[in-house]
Image (cartoon, coloured by chain):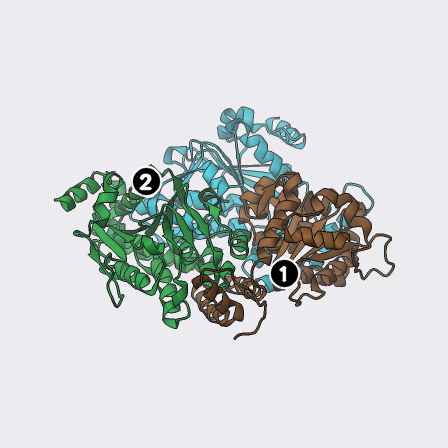
Chain colours: A brown, B green, C cyan
Amino acid sequence: MASSMARSVFCRGLPPWGLHRLTFLPGGARLSTRGGAPEPPAEPLTLREQHGGIRRIILNDPGRRNALSLSMLESLRQDILIDAHSDDLRVIIISAIGPVFSSGHDLKELTSARGRDHHTRVMTLIQDIPVPVIAMVNGVATAAGCQLVASCDIAMVTEKSTFATPGVNVGIFCSTPAVAIGRAVPKKVAMEMLFTGTPISAQDALRHGLVSRVVPEDRLEEETLAIAQRVCQASRPVVALGKATFHRQMAQGRDAAYATASQVMVDNLALRDGQEGIRAFIEKRKPIWSHAAETD
Amino acid sequence: MASSMARSVFCRGLPPWGLHRLTFLPGGARLSTRGGAPEPPAEPLTLREQHGGIRRIILNDPGRRNALSLSMLESLRQDILIDAHSDDLRVIIISAIGPVFSSGHDLKELTSARGRDHHTRVMTLIQDIPVPVIAMVNGVATAAGCQLVASCDIAMVTEKSTFATPGVNVGIFCSTPAVAIGRAVPKKVAMEMLFTGTPISAQDALRHGLVSRVVPEDRLEEETLAIAQRVCQASRPVVALGKATFHRQMAQGRDAAYATASQVMVDNLALRDGQEGIRAFIEKRKPIWSHAAETD
Amino acid sequence: MASSMARSVFCRGLPPWGLHRLTFLPGGARLSTRGGAPEPPAEPLTLREQHGGIRRIILNDPGRRNALSLSMLESLRQDILIDAHSDDLRVIIISAIGPVFSSGHDLKELTSARGRDHHTRVMTLIQDIPVPVIAMVNGVATAAGCQLVASCDIAMVTEKSTFATPGVNVGIFCSTPAVAIGRAVPKKVAMEMLFTGTPISAQDALRHGLVSRVVPEDRLEEETLAIAQRVCQASRPVVALGKATFHRQMAQGRDAAYATASQVMVDNLALRDGQEGIRAFIEKRKPIWSHAAETD
């Protein structure tokens, strides 16, 4: 019953989580859990739930400051990948339980090659998956936790959220987080963060492009869901084509980028939903998306 | 007489348009018109005028929200290209009649290959032409209209101006606009615009580098002309060399970029106006530019 | 005695320069001087001093607005390079005597090929040297002076500082400064600076990423030293590896960048100080750095 209520509430644009989060999320009964941990913890490392095209993945290890341990990363990766190509999935929101969004790598595991592979794999997966991924942050994001925010397509954060790459303080420079952060903010901002480890405020993160919006804490879920719902109103294959093209052309020079994008415009127009969109526009009506990847 | 007055007023740094725009521009008598439209419209699609080195091109199809139709693009292209290599041209200002700067492509024409070529060609032409191009925006700029603003070298806009890439809403992701916009603003800003279609304000556009300055509406023409006049005070071949070099070196790695720029410094110093500039500086007098592309 | 006082004051985090700058710096007795000038000036072109890992280099030619003459550049280069690989050097602060941080190239020397080589060499040296370089700016920085600020890893500036690339006004487009500035700020900001020569304020420089922080004039030295001291608290080889990696991976595509950074994480973990850092973290104690570049 809670599930169908949540679904209907979703359709009317009112998020249930804002009011009920504390009692709602850890219930677990309605939430499938993932995890490659050899001994499953009492609480699942991540919670996953999906309604109306919006998948929420919640980091659920507040006792360890949501460290991106190998188990956590594997859980996160599976939560992202499962049914990723289903039409039912249209957008992913990643958030966290507790005052720390994520404290980054588990330092004790860092020496493992498997750990390093996992880290990079999840970060690039977020950019390569065909649906937009939104970080919803209400707290501290450090090191690989900050990299996770930088890697998401959109980041909604509260005033009290802070962002830091303090690895230098423990002798492990945040070189992999710097790949994502250095591509999100001006170089001087990235370098000060990396060399000093000092956190930057949500407002500074906004000013420099690390996050998309800063909202009051009591509006975070509502505003994040509003953006997720906007994404849901679009055609899935159109968004998928657009996201993949954006990252592809940004890695090219201007003229090659225009050649890429111009060819994609042809592909987009050939999509059933591309045709439907133009017809609906000309007929001044709302488009009815098929969400089909095929062309007509 | 109006023309010579305008010219003399230009030289004294006082713009005539701020006062007389509504009666001045649509008159047409003093404005040459361009257009590849098979049937010329009653009103020309673009207006063009040039005084004192400043060419103004005005999108003049407010009834169709200054859509970048094939005819409009061809008219714009010709207005940019005509006598582009004349010493008389030193800077171009692109503005628009009506509350919409430009609503982007004409969706009905999008399926045509010719349309796609035209779009990209005008956008890259703005960057490749040897004089700076200033967008003067007082209203809404969407899709390819937003791309046009992003493609200009400088953009002066009013508080009420907004910028959006809403193609996703009609099933046509703004993949070509994303080439210009993704190179103007931080990636997170571009992606939120592209995935949601939500407009951003002039202040947000300024914050993120999409526009150069936000000014009150009643100061827009004056401030834009002031910048144009500053450009006119420089040597044309020096500006042309600088603009071409900027775009070229920005596409290179740091060391290659410095090699490019260092060689250009040699070329610049060899220009007659480079020599004159240094002489004037040493002699503590105003330089007298030849605007000649030759070296001494 | 002044020197040992300064050293002890350093260790306690209180900067001596804020109070004593005018009498302290030009004294010269405690400051070694460099310079390739054929006839050494009465005052050395740069002052250099080092305490507690922090090297200060001070441009000391206020009468010529700290022009980056060939002599000044050579003096600056030697001050940066001397004992650059000593463990005693951990961070460099570049500041200036007088109201002008630096007015850029000496125009009279620009025609010399030796000058051009020197310019580029010092700018890239700042990025390639293994310790962070902080610009501490309290005044005007123009042309190559602005490039110097853009080339530093961190820039602390006062409200009254301004930044400009006015070469276009004297017929010499700031094409080499544009290499550094175009990589520090959004393209529209760079192009307006380059085409108009108009200065931007410290706040605009901050907004667009050209500088790291704007602080009140009476707090400049204290805040700059606080950041320098934070850098000094880290392991030198860890910072060196991080700085080199940052610039290297930023020049690569995302996947190559992650491959680079992931390999560096292995190297970093193998460093003696990487091992010590993790041990100290796990043992909840302060790390004791060896600053040794060797691995265990």
Point out the residue furthest to the bottom here: A296
Q: Quadrant of residue A91?
A: bottom right
Subunit that carries the residue with mark 2: B
Marks 1/2: CA–CA distance: 45 Å
Circle 2: element type:
helix
Q: Quadrant of residue A214?
A: top right
Compare residues C282 and C231 and report the one nearer the observer: C282
Tag 1: residue type? Arg
Around disc 1, counting alpha carbons within 10 Å, would you say few (fewer than 14), some (14 to 19), or many (20 or more)? many
Q: Which residue is mark 2?
A: B223
Q: Nearer the viewer, mark 1 or mark 2?
A: 1
Quadrant assignment for the N terminus of chain B: top left
Q: Is residue A175 above or below residue C40?
A: below
Residue B276 as seen in the image, left or right of residue B69? left
Report the number of numbered marks: 2
Circle 1: element type:
loop
Q: Position of residue B51 (x, y in %)?
A: 20, 48
Q: Which mark is residue B172?
A: none
Compare residues C238 and B95 and report the one nearer the observer: B95
